[in-house]
Image: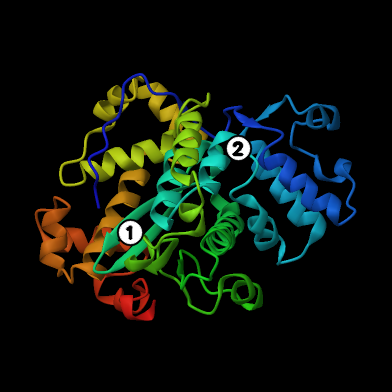
């Protein structure tokens, strides 16, 4: 599951309180959705720390926390379970400058997902994507970039709807997506089925989307347009030069721990990799509502699920891979990570490739 990403020492990391999301980007989209429903802007701004004048001027840069509060306010005012899906259908490619232009010129699903991952702070500041390929299946994992907590279900539904809608538009056809959710099954599935389809699985301990790998490199109509290759290259270069933070701190830490999962660094060593003191590193993680051990446990649980699902590994092999010296200790840890024992995992695994 690793692609050996290094952690550059001069990197700019963002968190939930970093002001970098232009008000004209995702916040404007959310407000436009509400205004289409004739909801006054003033009703959507409580606790956001934003004024109508700032939003109207367009020059303001909002934080992910402010964007999350805006989404919460919209959901509270509208009170419609369709809201995250309806907003998600407009989320991508979006009108976010060069990165959106690059995404519109993507010639295949693989190119689109690579762009989405490379420019996640611009295109997807709340959830970051990670693509994994195994056994003829492409898995798009969604990683919490800013400490979503109670708002994670709303944002996950929104982001999944965004991918479904975008890929349908760019591919010119529906892709056979399947979905897993790291939450219990809701009482009503009508909205999920209407916007995502019927291949849904809950209680999977990971938020992910699945599609057969053969769909990754099927040419999209954009690839067949005259000058499409040059246009795509130009838009990618422009997107690469865009200002702003390059990574979420939580996602960068996830990548570091994933690359070193067999022998993970201590908190002190990880802090040094991010050019932070251990105390500053702890404070930055606490600001996102988490801590180092919790993030390490999340990575270990994802690797364990991956090994069980795609490699058919047994407890001994998974324990060794994660650096545990004995299986009983691994079993106890796994139950702490996921709430179930490895033996109880079978019914909670991700959808098998045949289901996609």
Instruction: Name which residue lies at 86% across and 57% down.
Output: 37
Q: Using a 10 Å C-alpha cutoff, classify the residue at mark 1 as few (fewer than 14 neighbours), some (14 to 19) or many (20 or more).
A: few
The residue that label 1 is drawn on is 336
Q: Earlier in the sequence, mark 1 or mark 2?
A: 2
Specify few, some or many for label 2: CA neighbours under 10 Å numbering under 14, 14-19, or 20 or more. many
Residue depicted at x 54% and y 58%: 170
Q: Is residue 27 above or below residue 280?
A: below
Closer to the camera in the image, 80 or 29: 29
Image position, residue 140 (x, y; %): 40, 58
Q: Which residue is mark 2?
A: 64
Label number found at residue 111: none
As drawn, is 86 to the left or to the right of 223? right
Vertical position of residue 20 compared to residue 224: above or below = above
Quick check: can you spot residue 188? no
Residue under the point 71% across and 61% down: 83
Residue 108 in the image: above or below residue 67: below
**Which dot, 1 or 2, sits closer to the camera?**
2
Q: Farthest front residue?
A: 226
Q: Residue 284 location in percent, x, y?
A: 46, 29
253 or 91: nearer the viewer: 91
In this image, 263 relative to 10: left or right?
A: left
Tell me if I can see residue 234 in this picture. Answer: yes
The reply to whether dot 1 and dot 2 touch (C-beta < 8 Å) is no
Query: Is residue 213 found left or right of 239 in the rendered image?
Result: left
The picture places residue 270, in percent across and down from the top left corner, at 28, 30
Q: Residue at x 38, y 54 (%)?
A: 110
Q: Quadrant of residue 352?
A: bottom left
Residue 8 sits in which quadrant? top left
Q: Secondary structure at mark 1?
A: helix
Q: CA distance from mark 1 to mark 2?
A: 29 Å
Q: Position of residue 149 (x, y in %)?
A: 54, 50
């Amino acid at each position: 599951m690793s692609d050996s990403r290094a952690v550059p020492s001069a990197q700019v990391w963002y968190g939930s309180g970093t002001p970098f999301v232009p008000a004209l980007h995702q916040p404007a989209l959310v407000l436009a959705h509400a205004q289409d429903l004739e909801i006054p802007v003033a009703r959507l701004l409580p606790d956001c720390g934003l004024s109508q004048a700032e939003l109207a001027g367009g020059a303001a840069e909002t934080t992910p926390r402010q964007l999350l509060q805006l989404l919460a306010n919209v959901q509270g005012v509208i009170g419609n379970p369709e809201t995250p899906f309806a907003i998600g259908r407009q989320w991508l490619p979006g009108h976010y400058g060069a990165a959106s232009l690059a995404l519109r010129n993507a010639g295949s699903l693989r190119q689109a997902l690579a762009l989405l991952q490379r420019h996640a702070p611009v295109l997807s500041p709340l959830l970051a994507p990670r693509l994994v390929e195994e056994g003829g299946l492409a898995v798009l994992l969604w990683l919490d970039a800013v400490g979503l907590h109670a708002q994670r279900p709303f944002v996950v539904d929104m982001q999944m709807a965004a991918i479904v809608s975008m890929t349908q538009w760019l591919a010119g056809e529906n892709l056979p997506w399947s979905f897993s959710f790291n939450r219990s099954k809701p009482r009503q599935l009508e909205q999920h089925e209407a916007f995502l389809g019927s291949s849904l699985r809950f209680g999977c301990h990971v938020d992910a989307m699945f599609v057969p790998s053969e769909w990754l490199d099927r040419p999209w109509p954009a690839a067949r347009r005259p000058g499409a290759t040059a246009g795509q290259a130009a838009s990618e270069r422009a997107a690469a030069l865009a200002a702003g933070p390059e990574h979420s701190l939580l996602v960068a830490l996830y990548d570091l721990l994933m690359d070193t999962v067999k022998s993970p660094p201590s908190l002190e060593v990880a802090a040094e990799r991010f050019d932070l003191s251990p105390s500053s590193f702890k404070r930055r993680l606490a600001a996102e509502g988490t801590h180092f051990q919790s993030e390490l446990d999340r990575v270990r649980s994802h690797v364990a699920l991956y090994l069980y699902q795609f490699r058919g590994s047994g407890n001994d092999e998974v324990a060794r891979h994660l650096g545990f010296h004995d299986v009983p200790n691994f079993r106890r840890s796994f139950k702490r990570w996921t709430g179930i024992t490895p033996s109880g995992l079978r019914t909670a695994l991700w959808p098998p490739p045949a289901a996609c």
